[in-house]
Image (cartoon, grey):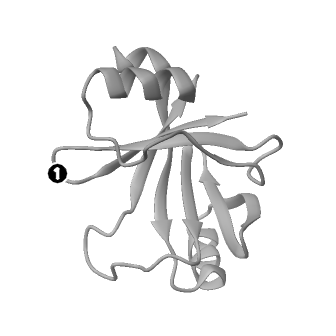
Amino acid sequence: MLSKYFTGVQHIGIPANDLDQTIKFYKSLGFKVAGLFNNQGNRCAFMKYNTLMIETWEGDPCANKDGAINHFAVNCTDADKAFAEAKKDGYHLLDDHVESIPAYWKHGIHFFKIQGPNHEAIEFCQIL
């Protein structure tokens, strides 16, 4: 069962047309910058308010319409095992392997995404 590999919501992913403007907007709501990272020449900010975390980044197109959240992520305890379980259980995998971004957080992340029944992307993200 895939649920044994996650502990709850980790973040909500929203691409930004203008990252500086997006950071300023969320700061005006009381969010703080929890992390600012560079990934292959694009910046990514994690904005935190209490237990709510928003990942916002530049470099990907924005839908610029209602319902434009790119993904939500669950806090994954073991991305490799969760990926194998998702594959075995027949989930619609949006990635063909577990991906890594070494520049995020102190030791990087491992993650993969599945697709929900309404075309929502659900990311299983393990902070290393």
Residue at the spot x=56%, y=66% of the render? 56
Residue 27 placement, left or right of 121: right
The kind of secondary structure element at disc 1 is loop
Residue 76 placement, left or right of 46: left
- Which residue sits furthest front? 96
Residue 84 placement, left or right of 104: left
Residue matched to label 1: 118
Q: Amino acid at mark 1?
A: Asn
Residue 114 lies in quadrant: top left
Residue at the spot x=38%, y=19% of the render? 3
Residue 38 drawn above or below residue 120: below
Instruction: Indicate the quadrant containing the C terminus: top left, top right, bottom left or bottom right.
Output: top right
Residue 77 drawn above or below residue 74: above
Which sits in the foreground, 122 or 10?
A: 122
Residue at the spot x=66%, y=82% of the render? 20
- Which residue sits furthest left? 117
